[in-house]
Image: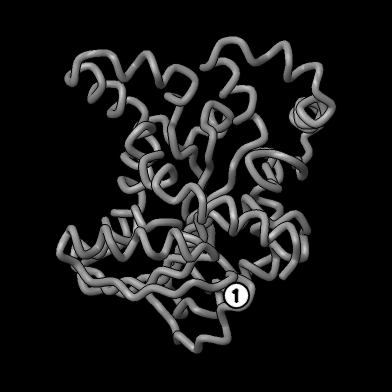
Amino acid sequence: MDESIETVRRHYNQNAQEEWDRLTHHPFEFELTTWMMDKYIRPGETILDIGGGPGRYSLHYARKGCSVTLADLSEGNIALAGQKARELGVSIRTHAVNCLELDSLQLGTFDHVFLMGPLYHLPQESQRVEAVRVALRHLKPGGKLYVSFILAFAGVIFDLRNAGNIEADVANPDCGYLIDCVENGENYTGPGFTTVCFYHQRQILPFMEQFPLQKLHLFGQEGFLAPNEHELLQRSPGEIQTWLTLARRYLELPELLSYSEHAMYIGRKK
């Protein structure tokens, strides 16, 4: 196994519970992402979740009556997804597999395919292209593909939200390169929480336009709420819901995309 991929596998094997808890600590991402996905996904439809971690999105749609298959590189993630499925009383199919080797399982085609994680960790452009092609081979004609990217500006947002990091990060050569990528409109690949690839917002559509897809949406998965998330979550439930309503209205404004840490492209297979 490629060493960068093995590093990713070990990271998630050791941090599966933390990955499950991430969307509890950062609820705006899940709330706004599922709001967009719910425009298309209906009970009884089939979903393949590639690189879906411990299955937060898989289980959400299994509970809604979809037939869900979850494939993830990490055995720890897959084990936790199975545990959570039993606790919730739902059934999903699971496979511990590298996304680039998914064809070997002969899973067939699905109404919807999620690719919400693998592109964060594939350092080579050719690997990212192949990951999308694998996803498309498992998608029915007319089906929907949901592709997530971590944005290059996410590292700056993290430091804005968490005091005491920016001075050290500016002095760190790797972080300095990331800052340069934001300024220069380039993607960042290099050290992060594992080997990572962070996309500049201007590079997403050119990357996705090489595939046989009709673009439906490109949006920030946290809306414009990410920089102030910690403080917003301390406010009243009514005010939080008002901010979420406003975020939904602004979700696809391209000039606000960099306020999010993650972006999602939704496309229909031609």
Taking the image as shown, residue 171 lies to the left or right of residue 212, namely right
Q: On the rendered image, what quadrant is the N terminus found in?
A: bottom right
Up the image or down, 70 lies above or below 239; here it is below
Q: Which residue is mark 1?
A: 134
Up the image or down, 178 lies above or below 72; here it is above
Taking the image as shown, residue 78 lies to the left or right of residue 85, namely right
Residue 28 image position (x, y, % from top left): 36, 33
Closest to the observer, 48 or 266? 48
Up the image or down, 62 lies above or below 95; here it is above
Q: Residue at x 40, y 38 (%)?
A: 29
Taking the image as shown, residue 44 lies to the left or right of residue 126, namely left
Residue 91 image position (x, y, % from top left): 23, 71
Q: Amino acid at mark 1?
A: Val
Q: Quadrant of residue 160?
A: top right
Q: Residue at x 47, y 76 (%)?
A: 139
Q: Badge 1 local density, few (<14 within 10 Å), some, or many (20+)? A: some
